[in-house]
Image (cartoon, rainbow, N blue to C red):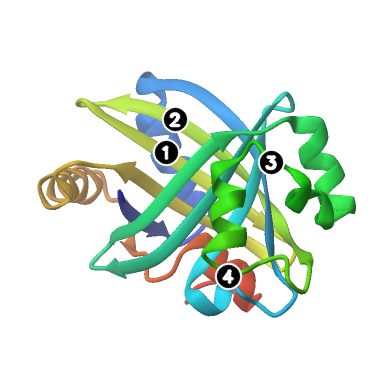
Amino acid sequence: MEVEIKLRLPDSATHQKLSNLLSPFHTKTLIQENIFFDGKNAELTSNLAVLRIRFYNLENCVLSLKAKPVISGGISRMEEHEEPFDPALGRACIAEPWRLLSVDSSEILKRVKDEYRVGDSGVVCLGGFRNVRAVHEWKGLKLELDESNYDFGTSYELECESADPERDKNLLEEFLKGNGINYSYSKVSKFAVFQSRKLPE
């Protein structure tokens, strides 16, 4: 189970202000490309699941299956399984999604075929979006400051994986309020934003 605090930032100026505040704690920046797949009959999305290939910093690739998301009060909970994936094969799967079903070494793809019955009618690539993620180590927490670039606009978010989300959310909110950073609780996932083709209100 992945548990994350997700706080939405209203605009690029707020994102830049927070980035400046967090700069002493910055550890790395990841350039991510997120590509999503489903069965031709929406076998995954109709069951609140999503299959994603993520490329980051050009040479790395991760395959993930996320399912049963619940977002409430700025805290997201969902099942998540991840595996390293060959970047060249990942690129080939974008052009020819059927290749995913021929990968026998992946437990995720086995589950996609067996549990969700993807493959009976084929696989489709849904497209995706790019994300610039600045990672910070702050007060024992890993903060991820995101700039997500969709083809219909850009959104900004602060994320933090947490074992004690209520405590850590309070800590983050105190920090943001104390520094005049406007924010709101994220109500939907980045994939849901991508699907809706509309930036969150």
Q: Secondary structure at mark 4?
A: loop
Residue 83: quarter of image: top right
Please say if 27 is above or below 191. Answer: above
Q: How far across and down, in percent of the image, does residue 20 sit?
A: 43, 32
Provide residue 90's location: percent of width, then percent of height. 76, 40
Between residues 150 and 65, which one lies in front from this camera angle?
A: 65
Earlier along the polypeptide chain: callout 2 or callout 3? 3
Residue 57, x across and y down, in percent: 68, 27
**Disc nearer the start of the sequence (1/4):** 4
Q: What residue appears at the point 48 percent right and 72 percent down from the top-left corner?
A: 48
Closer mark to the observer between disc 4 and disc 3: 3
Identify which amino acid the numbered label 2 is placed on: Val
Image point 49% across, 75% down: which residue?
47
* For the residues bearing labels 1 and 2, Cβ distance under 8 angstroms: yes
Residues 64 and 147: in front is 64
Which residue is tagged 4? 44
Instruction: Give the left or right position of residue 187, taking residue 58 as reference.
Output: left
Tag 1: amino acid = Glu
Task: Give amino acid for label 3.
Answer: Asp
Write down the residue under mark 3. Answer: 104
Of residues 34 and 37, the one nearer the viewer is 37
- The residue labelled by disc 1 is 144
